[in-house]
Image: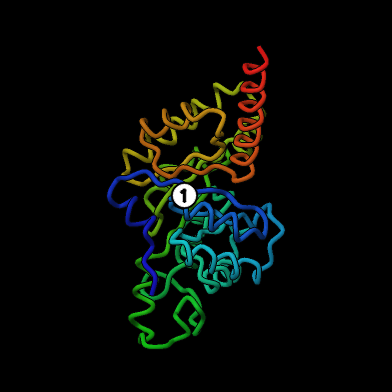
Amino acid sequence: MRINTTKQKLAEGKPVFGGIVGENAPSTIEILGAIGYDFVMIDCEHGPMTLSDVEGLVRAAEAFGITPLARVPDHEPATILRFLDRGIQGVIVPHVNTAEEAEAVARAARYYPEGNRGMASTRAHDYNVGVPRGEAAQHLNENVMVVPMVEEITAVRNLDAILKVPGIDVIHCAPADLAQSMGFPPDEEVQRVRREVVAKCVAAGIPVGLGGNSPNNPAQTAEFVRQGARFVTVPALSLLQFAARQFRAQVEAALAAQAK
């Protein structure tokens, strides 16, 4: 059965890097894996993928040694179960605002005695071939990642309680919905709140990630990592746009220099 290498690296205190893929594009995931990214966030909150699509994307991730995580569309235990049964090694759960909600998703992602995830002989279990159910359940409990998203000011106010919930592996703080919940204040106020989230997570010993990273501003991402953030995401389409613009600009600059 597969080891969650992203979870291992986080346990060692190392930063991990992931690309957000919002469409059924296995080759994008394979390229991220080949480059050396640690994980892919398959975005099924905003993306159009079906569960069959997700299973194919998981296979692409496994083939290229990159951890498959999914941002699921809701908190429902049945939703979390179906994604994990496809072979997803972690769920990123949007709009987790209370400790009670965090506890519910943590338990939905794990088997007894840590949770109440439904048992089945799916690909996550290697189809129940060669591994007893109890051993498989323990292995999956140890390797799953539960990542609540703190993306509303209500969640920030409840963060101390959320951080005490057993089974929370990473807190991920996203700026767009956070800004919306704050009434769209100046960006510096949003960044101040995000720094507060990072500081509280670091003090609690829980890895923290920050969404909204842009390839146009790697210095800002590096600053958050210096402050203690360890779970770095960037949209794959943003990386494509950045590289496409940079390539064209460099070619045009070279042509202009040659014409002088």
Secondary structure state at the residue bearing disc 1: helix
Quarter of the figure that contains the C terminus: top right
Farthest residue toward the top?
A: 260
* Residue at image point 68% right, 52% down: 46
Q: What's the residue type where badge 1 is placed?
A: Ile
232, 257: nearer the viewer: 257
Position above or below: 147 against 57: above
What percent of the width, then of the height, locates residue 203?
31, 38
Give the total number of marks visible in the rendering: 1
124, 259: nearer the viewer: 259
98, 242: nearer the viewer: 242
Q: Name the side, left or right, on which 85 lies relative to 228.
A: right
What percent of the width, then of the height, locates residue 230?
39, 42
Can you tell which quarter of the image residue 241 is in? top right
* Residue at image point 34% right, 74% down: 138
Position above or below: 145 against 188: below
Position above or below: 170 against 260: below
Residue carrying label 1:
35
Farthest residue toward the front?
A: 259
What percent of the width, then of the height, locates residue 222?
42, 31
116, 255: nearer the viewer: 255
Q: Name the side, left or right, on which 108 lies relative to 95.
A: left
